[in-house]
Image (cartoon, coloured by chain):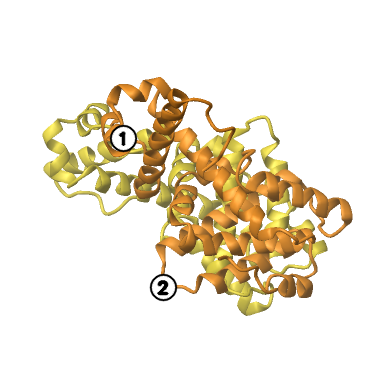
Chain colours: A orange, B yellow
Amino acid sequence: MSTSAPPSNRFERRRAATRQALVRAARQILAESGDAGVSIQAIAERADVGFGSFYNHFESKTELFDAAVTDALDEYGEAVDQLLHGIDDPAELVATGLRLSIKMAESHPEIMEILRHRGLGQLHSDRGLAPRALRDLERGAASGRFALPDVAVALSALGGSLMALLELRFARPDIDGDKAAENMAEMALRMLGVPFDEAGKVARRPLPDLD
Amino acid sequence: MSTSAPPSNRFERRRAATRQALVRAARQILAESGDAGVSIQAIAERADVGFGSFYNHFESKTELFDAAVTDALDEYGEAVDQLLHGIDDPAELVATGLRLSIKMAESHPEIMEILRHRGLGQLHSDRGLAPRALRDLERGAASGRFALPDVAVALSALGGSLMALLELRFARPDIDGDKAAENMAEMALRMLGVPFDEAGKVARRPLPDLD
């Protein structure tokens, strides 16, 4: 969950806890069904808060679900940041970020199901992996590690490829997700202008420990 | 719309017309809102058929919306087939298919909005662009035009990139869609193992006439 300064008194702590319970319930619903066709009553029951509390925090279901997506994206971004800590090469950052994201389908299924259902609209968001990938693309383009006809389109292609692989990973649990992610990372690096031999090697470097 | 043998008598013709009206209404709803949160009553009204007719054709909303997605995918596949007629190089087929799909956001907005909302789950479907792209990937891999670590993952990457570009095209009407699609096509060909210079050229060949 995203964190901010802790609330200062009991009233504010309760208020924050109620909001967080609603966001948590909305995250679960998004991960399960991917749609917002549920009633506010059902969300409040799931969050174990009174129906009336809902409108103290959100004006509409849409606002709550948007907050839930943001919350999941923030947690995703922070998790990836921790895992990529210490890697400096933009090519390895892109390849490893992609491979770790597929591994997170197992270790963080709720976040990744939310991404599966809602991620396509978030590929240029300022939350989650997008701003981190954009920074790596720009750094790689500046240093000559990448050769990009268009950074925004490259970000779309990377994000779309990740979304598609995530969909494949969830829809076809029989395939070897790690192997598929290595192959996807290799193709992604080629796409970014990394020479083919080098792309194959960087995409198969040892991963940081997910635990 | 997909076509089959024409119905043989008046009763069957009316029956087919009712089904088609329901599918058409479902396509409009999918394109507008992307979700199935509408009532069967509202769908029947939109299709201008009686509420009771619905269950003569579909067991559930899900079944109708699936039929609507299939119908749109078939129309998409047939349109692309006609446009790509006469092109033989797998690399040019992939690049041109991608660029034409982005152009179709303007010429065929309903189909492309449906794809935007529902396409991610259809990347390995046997309808629409997927089976055609798979055929081109396999032909290109066999002839050496492509070098693919994994055909299924390559299909995911291509489809995901197209979905992401379509999302960008609809969400940001200010960007130059044709230019973005050329750049995406160039990166897609690199990804498939086409040498970088060649990828840049093939991605910018003149397009067939869309009209």
- Quarter location, residue B168: top right
Residue bearing the label numbered 1: A43
- Give coordinates of residue A103: x percent, y percent: 53, 64
The CA span between labels 2 and 1 is 33 Å
**Which image quadrant: the C terminus of chain B?**
top right
- Give coordinates of residue B210: x percent, y percent: 59, 43
- Give coordinates of residue A140: x percent, y percent: 81, 55
Which residue shows up at 76% across the image and 51% down it? A137
Q: Amino acid at mark 2?
A: Asp
Reading the chain from its start, which is encountered first: label 2 or label 1? 1
Please, is residue A96 above or below residue B19 in the view?
A: below
Q: Secondary structure at mark 2?
A: loop
Residue bearing the label numbered 2: A174
Q: Secondary structure at mark 1?
A: helix
Please, is residue A125 above or below residue A193 in the view?
A: above
Please, is residue A126 above or below residue B6 in the view?
A: above
Residue at the far front: name it. A9
**Which image quadrant: the N terminus of chain B?**
top left
Q: Amino acid at mark 1?
A: Ile
Q: Is residue A99 left or right of residue A192?
A: left
Q: Which mark is residue B73?
A: none
Q: Nearer the viewer, residue B46 or B205?
A: B46
Which residue shows up at 52% across the image and 60% down it? A104
Q: Is residue B59 left or right of residue A31?
A: left
- Report if residue A123 is visible in the image: yes
Q: Nearer the viewer, residue A125 or A10?
A: A10
**Chain label for disc 2:** A
Which residue shows up at 46% across the image and 38% down it? A68
